[in-house]
Amino acid sequence: MKWIKKMTGLLLTLALVFSGFTGLRPVSAADAVPLPIGSLVPPTLPAPEATIDLAQSGDTITLTATFTSSVAVNPDNVNRSAHLIDADAPQRNLASWDIKSLTQDSSGNPQLSFLVNREWLGPGKTYYVTIDDDAFVDANDPTVIYDGFQDDQTWRFQTKQASPAIVSRLTPTGTNVQPPTQLTIQFSKPIIGKKSGTIAVQGQGVAKQNIDISSNAVAVNGTNTVVISLPQNLRYNTSYTVSVPAGAFEDNDHVLTPAIANSDWTFTTASSTSSQLVISSLSPSNGSSNVSPGTSVLTATFNSNIKAAAGTTFSLGTASGVLLYKYGSSTPLSGTAAVSGKNLVITPASALTEGSSYYIIISGTAIMDAVTNAYFGGLTSTSGWYFTTATLDKTPPVIQKAQVYSNNTIRLQYNESLSSVSLPANIYSVTVNGETRSISSAYAAGDSVYVTLQVGVAVGQNIRISYSPSSSYLRVADLSQNAAASFSNMEVENGLETSMPKPKDGYISGNTVVLHFADSLQSVSSYAYSQFTVTQDGSSTSVAGISQSGSTVTLTLSSSAIANAVVKVNYTPGSYPLKDYRGLEIPTFSDFFVRNYNDNRPPQFQGVVGSNNKIILTYDEGLSTTNVPLKSQYSILVNNSPVYVTAIGIKDNQVTLTLASSFNASQSVTLSYVSAAGGISDWSNNLAGYLNLVPVQYGNVTAGIGSATVNGDTMKIQFNNSLSTASSSSGISIGYFAVTVDNQNRSLMSASLSGNTLTIMLGSPVNAGQTVTFSYIPGSSGVLRDSQGNSLNAISQAAVQNTTGSVNNGGTTGSAIAPNLSILSSSEFNQSGYVLDRAAATAATAYSRGGQTVNKYTIDAAKLTDAYNYIASNAAANARVMVFEVPSSNKAAYVGAPLKPLMDAFTRSSEAEFGIKYGDVLYLLPLKQLPFSSLAMSLGAGFNSANVWFQIEQVSKDNLNIINSSNGVTTLPLLDPTEVFISAATGASADLSYMNVSGDLFIKTGGSVSASNTAMYAYDRSTQKVLFVPTKISSSGAYTVLTTTLKSGSSLVGPRSGYANLTDIQNHWANTTISELVSKSVMDPAASGLFKPKQNITRAEFATYIAKGLGLSPDKASAAAFGDVSPSSEAAGYIGAAAKAGIVAGVSSTAFKPGSYITREQMTLMMARAMSSAGQPLNASVNPDGVLSKFKDNKQISAASKAVVAQAVNAGVIQGTSTGTFNPKGTATRAEAAVMLKRVLDKLRFLK
């Protein structure tokens, strides 16, 4: 037993400073005489003075203990400590301080002092102080050692309870509220933190919005105001309630806030009216490309005068709610903005960089109507207002051809748009049959230069032109002022088709059509109108009169122009032919497009065909030849590899692309086009829309051929325009044509023409698989011409598609197939099965989860039973799938399937599946996923009348406020994501609670996608993030199908493509693997733009990446057992998810060591468990000693791990080192971890 000596005159002072206490542990009470304490400040409870008022305290609080004997610090135990403990959690220390020295008070008594931050204590809490044994000795006799005290009563005090913050204002409230994008709560005290729980926003008749309080959607910044960003837009004319749970927030006194009930916070949105504040125009326009880097201001023009919450002039940034970003960076650019009238003018602080993309974000509380104070809804997505600056063009324009445009004008066509300017006539010289011809003028417009001669030319004359600019300013140049090269004695095409008089353009306005010809015409007869026909959207409009003045012909119609109609003019000369001033008759022309001035509809894409190195896009109306897009606005993929566009030509309603290399019929070709100002448009400058991965149909495009096919002895050549011959007969001499079959000439029997189709009968049929070509040799007479009088050029050995022996691959149905059933075409989703048609269901009007009015289908139980009976008796084992098809015209799928027939079908076949086909989406639910037993117990007697409800709906990506870019990685949506919600209910509508079932989602896209950076992602509305989910990518006909398994009955998933610009891996041996995993958000950069491949990987990182690769949902609660894993870190959720799945384990029951480098042995165990968790365990039958014997250090592998390591090595998941060792205790770099992780995911088929 220790000697205890009474001591007097010792004052122990503890100054406690509140800052981050950690390391709580239980202490035991002292078992000897406690230290002789004279007094304590604050005294031990229940003394009134023991209560500390934190609100009245400074940054530090002093606690003092006075002893009755002289003491000193024990020199043999300098590591003894004093501890502060929360009485509500005595197992953990709030803080500990080493006792190493003493001071003295004013009376000479010894003191022990500490500094502690005030913020460590909370209001209304009880604390106590303990001191370790052996900390002090007698100052006069060091052999006398004193015990401390470890009980919770010796020195016990409490803090005063603070009053909670109360709500002083909720926004919005009341009626006629413009639908907000944010909600705000104003408290009576500053709010310094947020806790957990869910804020619920419930609208009448619409799906509830649940907002995670811990997510980025809820902003707390130390002020009295909390801002809540809504994940989805609110509907007009709808009543809403908002509820906030108790303890959601913490005020500056560390008191949690009380609940806000849904009855306390209500509001009703206004009816939608045309007076809503919206943007009328943007400059640069949304999606525009080729924007000048010199652009100094960006302007948004609204439909009403506006004002800004931040003032008339303000800085760009989060505070003002107006932000400018450069794609690929999460840091907004600096600059200013100003409001004036209807305009919001943004001025970047520094010049825009060339070849870069930018976007503007405007929050829902930044801009208001200057009169009504109604908020503008905001631009909250990266695609709301974005543009791309031009890359400086340093390539000069190249002349493509020279031809006679009219009898006195030569057209010089270049490969790109030119700077429109009048040119000096003397920079050109022209000779006609060797004689110099005077030039009156020259000018550039669109992609051409027009040179006008003083005296016209005749058909067939030899014309040559030279170009030699005398000034660096007055010369031919493109829009970037790159000068075209001079040329000498270039021959000018001067055939019949180039010099025949014909209209060059025209328009319709009101009830008149005006046609402009290249040359003046002779006076026309008043009866000449009968030779014209005009169509609007394919319907004929009567021509009632005609007049002519110079080179202009005006037709008077019986009715006015139809808004947005496609207008064509046809002319067939009869008794009153039109003639030019030389007396030459205007030849027949048909389908001549004219501009409709009452047109604001974009040109509609009709289709695309191509072969060799040409691709032709067809639109439904005439296109402007002035607006020629950049070649970089087109993307051509041949078998997923890019092929560049070298030239663009526009004629009538077609765009012709010339490629850098050719392709053939066996290759997969897709076309994409980025619409932007200056791109493809009609004559009213309505821009054609975007095209994304459109399959290019293989067809011969040589010399105007649309398609060329042969089947047996019949060849059909379909041209892009109607053709005619010199005679009125449809028969044509076979002498103009030649056909080869496997390089041997084939005799011809006859040739005939009908419209745009040429039919040739062969002397003998071709066989399947033979190679066939077609040639056309025009003669001096009987030449084929198109409807505008242009003669058809010679065609040399154009490829002909041989369809001999082809069969229809479509599905067929047997005569005995059950009513209401048809075959599910496997060409759509690579799935075999049956389709239950809509006649098997009744329809009723309902609201979708997104608030849209849709048809709700309820399938008849008897018809579903009959269908499953048929499948059970007739279907193959791999066709146990039945789907109900919802019309794609429906805004969402809402289908109820009777539960009893589904259970009966499962009883017959445990592999049966039921699904919904809706447009480009297919969802299949294995019936074994339905919890029939628990549903029977919960539904009781209602089981037989219950339905499983399938709700599938596309959610606009622009309404989700998803963070597209983070840490240098950008993911962009290919399509709007799809929401799937599965529930069961006895009523006539779906339940609000989803079932925890797992089903497969198939989404098809037109054309092909890049499997190396494309995957399906789950959308998390609360965190505004997207998470990779395991994805299979396959081709099905002309489509690409992306498939993933949804592990919940409530999911929001869609395909996205990722882009990562990692500057430190470009020449790294694992570049391809790293790029794929980072682009798909499976792995993260170590820093923005850097992967740091040589850096060792930690346990937390590898656990996170495995969990992400398996598509596990974050689960922070399951990581709480590990005291060294910060609950606020992103890794905590994934470590918890991996631990819950049995993939990772801690180094002990309470520690994970997240920052420690992971060993190769630990990695192997994690990967093996991951494969087992995913349902594909490694082969356990391998002989560990045999497999591992090749490693020199195999004895160093832990005995408990040896079997699993052998299985992983045998499966190729992990390999040895170059030195012949396994190195089980060694670390791995981030690059090595990427390679091993990809092996696992590839074996699981989770990447592609």
Image (cartoon, rainbow, N blue to C red):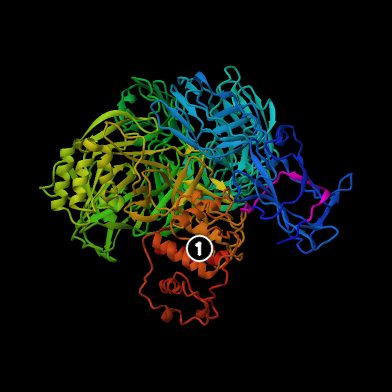
Residue 100 image position (x, y, % from top left): 79, 57
Nearer to me, 1083 or 287: 1083
Q: Is residue 894 visible?
A: yes
Nearer to me, 300 or 128: 128
Nearer to me, 783 or 217: 217
Nearer to me, 987 or 461: 987
Q: Is residue 581 visible?
A: no
Residue 275 image position (x, y, % from top left): 51, 19
Q: Please state, as top left, top right, bottom left or bottom right, where the N terminus lies in the image.
A: bottom right
Asked whether 1197 falls inside the magenta stretch, the response is: no
Q: Please state, as top left, top right, bottom left or bottom right, where the C terminus lies in the image.
A: bottom left
The residue most toward the left is 816
| Residue lying at 52% horizontally and 21% vertically, measured from the top left | 173
User: SS of the residue at dot 1?
Assistant: helix
- In the figure, residue 229 lies in which quadrant? top right
Q: Is residue 222 above or below residue 510?
A: below
Q: Is residue 1233 above or below residue 729?
A: below
Position of residue 177 in the picture relative to residue 187 (left or right): left
Q: Which residues are magenta?
A: 5-28
Residue 739 image position (x, y, % from top left): 27, 59
Residue 683 image position (x, y, % from top left): 47, 33
Disc 1 marks which residue?
1073
Position of residue 1170 in the picture relative to residue 1151 (left or right): left
Asked whether 15 falls inside the magenta stretch, the response is: yes
